[in-house]
Image: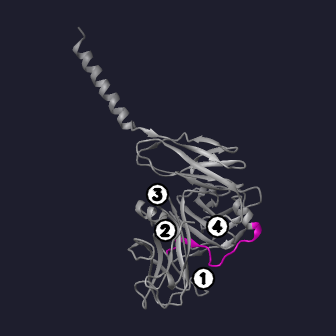
Amino acid sequence: MMNPRKVLRALLASFAWVGLVSCHGTEPTYSVSGSVTGSSGAIAVKLNGGNDIFMSGNGDFKFTGKLLSGNAFNVQVVDANDDCTVSGGAGTIDQSDITGVAVSCVPQSLQNAIVRTAKLSGSRENPSVTTNASGVGGIILAAASTTITGGITISGLTPVASQIHIHQAPSGNPTGNGPAIITLLLAADGLTAVVPPGTALNANQVVSLRAGELYFNVATAANPNGEIRGPIELQGGVAASVAILDKSQVSPPTQSNALGGGTLLADLATGKVLISYITQNVTNVTGAAIHASTGPGTNGASIIPFGNLQANFDNAGSNLASPLSTAKMTAQNLADFAASLLYFEVDSQANPGGDIRGNITPQ
């Protein structure tokens, strides 16, 4: 018969082992996998901005990083040779592996819109910088156009009073340092910076954009050459739209002669608004927001109020409206975006229910 004290010690050791495992986590983890088709050369597939898989071309991929149920996942790609879309690559893990993520690429063409996003950090600087600051953003260049919209949203810094630019890295060297080509305009909150209205890229800069050689750079007093940097290179994984605002889209239409332009880039997995703003020339603005309608041409409630209202922000007569840097879209908001039910609206003293409006259509 076993000694009772030995039995007790064995039981206690067993309980301690179970407790230790529990403390270190025994929750099941899940993988993300899919395939690339149509790529004409090297491509990098990323999960949540990291976990890079480098591929020489088409084929299957499976990330080694594991996620817990409830974690967000977003698959994006870097491809300097193609224009790519990602299907089934963004959402939330729900107690099962994610399979069948489809990355579909086609040769670059002037007839394709360019949507590229960026994640900014100190580690991306050359040389790297130690900082708690970060940023997200992106730009949109419409098909058969050279005019861009976009910008960045910054976190972890006191409001920035220094220079924020888009730079052009040396050809063939996207991590190298290059000259500033566009100065971004800082919004009233000091944490949102946007591309000036009417900004256009020349042919060489469009080539650099497609090659991932343009980058955002935020300079501060502590780091005058740049505290955070982010290559404008990520494809897929975002809700993107550019809209024209006018009186004809208001329901019912107004008599306003004002015009505006709205930009939206949001993360499809988390709903984080990477950058959104409206430039407009409405007189006596009282508010601006993204709204959700119940159907084409109908009115709906504000889902993202634009608390930053700034008159004549570019010294050329344009007014700016943008949301807080913490703005997020819900899963329902993203579903409404996909169904083209969202719209930008600017209100005025003369038209408090909407002076101009721009219906948001996925890019």
| Label 1 vs label 3, nearer the camera | 3
Three-letter amino acid code at the position of disc 1? Asp
Q: Of residues 341 and 175, which is closer to you in this image?
A: 341
Tag 2: Cα neighbours inside 10 Å, few (<14), some, or many (≥20)?
Answer: some
**Magenta-drawn segment:** 189-204
Three-letter amino acid code at the position of disc 4? Pro
Give the residue at mark 4.
224
12 displayed left or right of 21: left
**For the residue labelled by badge 2, is the local secondary structure a helix, a strand or a loop?**
loop
Give the residue at mark 1.
314
Q: Of residues 239 and 250, which is closer to you in this image?
A: 250
> Gap between marks 1 and 2, in whole Å?
30 Å
Tag 1: Cα neighbours inside 10 Å, few (<14), some, or many (≥20)?
Answer: some
| Label 2 vs label 4, nearer the camera | 2
Tag 3: Cα neighbours inside 10 Å, few (<14), some, or many (≥20)?
Answer: many
Label number found at residue 270? 3
